[in-house]
Image (spheres, rainbow, N blue to C red):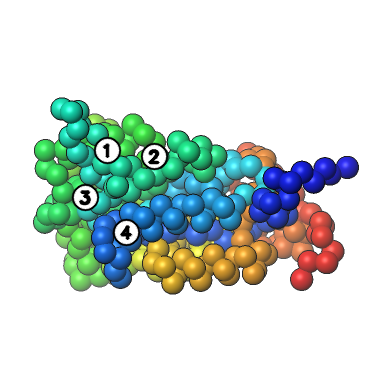
Amino acid sequence: MVLLLPWRAAAQPSLPPNELGRVMILEYHLIEEPEARWARTPANFRRDLERLRAQGYRLVGLTDYIAGRIALPSGTTPVILTFDDSSPGQLRFSERNGKVEVDPSSAVGIMEAFAREHPEFGLKATFYVLPGAKQPHKLFGQPEHEQAKLEYLVKRGFEIGNHTLWHANLAKYPEATVRQQLARAQAWVERLVPSYRLRTLALPMGAYPSQLEWAIRGSVNGTQYAHEAILMVAGGAAPSSFHRKFDPYHLPRIQATEPELQGWLKHFQQTPGDRYVSDGDPTTVRVRKERVDQVRQPLPAGLRLVGEAPTNPARP
Ligand SMILES: [Zn+2]
């Protein structure tokens, strides 16, 4: 018997598992005043987190999604946060009483405060940094704190990704330049955070080099780079990592502007069948029976496919 307590009734109606549903990879740029095409205000960013949480979304790390390691409670939906171009509003350090602290109005400060209040929401994001860009985009814009910021992100479990050395349009350059842009970004980061590997690449302006292989892996002057996934700048929600259409080298993203976010949140409310919903068991991939043939084969090691009859026959 299901006891409908008042606070249960007020919560998000629970959705049946759908581990072939799509996942939003949100893309943020500036976090600052005023709101603009490429800027989200700190207040609006915080509100985004609140809306996502209230609608049953939970943060997962990008590399966990790629690996198919989605360990979320039953009925919740993964969402991934990405930040491009390493501007100060994403991670600002400020001094208070002689102590250096994360500015609470920068994206990292906002996410940390939100996670303290709502630990179930999680604390994960990937930062696509520019180690050789002009200020204020060179590693978050405070030269004296560059190294401490990268160390801080790693220590707190955030991911750092490759966005080239200085935001190069990789479609415009020959192979040697493309590879240098990627390897030099890796070299910079590993000089500041020894042995850290940039595991994913976000393409500046979404521009692919003439040959995909150049972006995936290579070695320049003894520095190796290897990317498990490549992110575009647009394209909508991403396929489930268990879907046969999942292509880690062409992952679409959703730009986190007000109209885009509103549109996608509404879409997933109105079309829950398109939305990834976890079954609460990270070792199974639970999908509706009639969609079993859409599951990618083979699945990542250790995962078991479960095809289920619909739980709600009245489902549209
Ligand atoms: Zn960029």
Label 3 Cα neighbours within 10 Å, binned few <14 / some 14-19 / many ≥20: many
| Label 2 – label 1 distance at C-alpha | 9 Å
Helix, strand or loop at label 2? It is helix
**Residue beneath the point at 76% across and 54% down:** 307
Which amino acid lies under the numbered mark 2 shown in the image of this protein?
A: Glu
Mark sitting earlier along the chain (2/1): 1
**Residue beneath the point at 40% across and 40% down:** 113
**Residue beneath the point at 55% across and 39% down:** 120
Residue that label 2 marks:
112
Mark sitting earlier along the chain (2/3): 3
Question: Residue 161 has which mark?
Answer: none
Q: Quadrant of residue 28?
A: bottom left
Number of marks in the image? 4
**Observer-nearest residue: 57 or 248?**
57
Mark sitting earlier along the chain (3/1): 3
Is residue 150 in sight in this rendering?
no
Residue that label 3 marks:
88
Question: Residue 41 has which mark?
Answer: 4
Residue 206 place in picture, x, y as percent = 32, 67
Question: Residue 102 has which mark?
Answer: 1
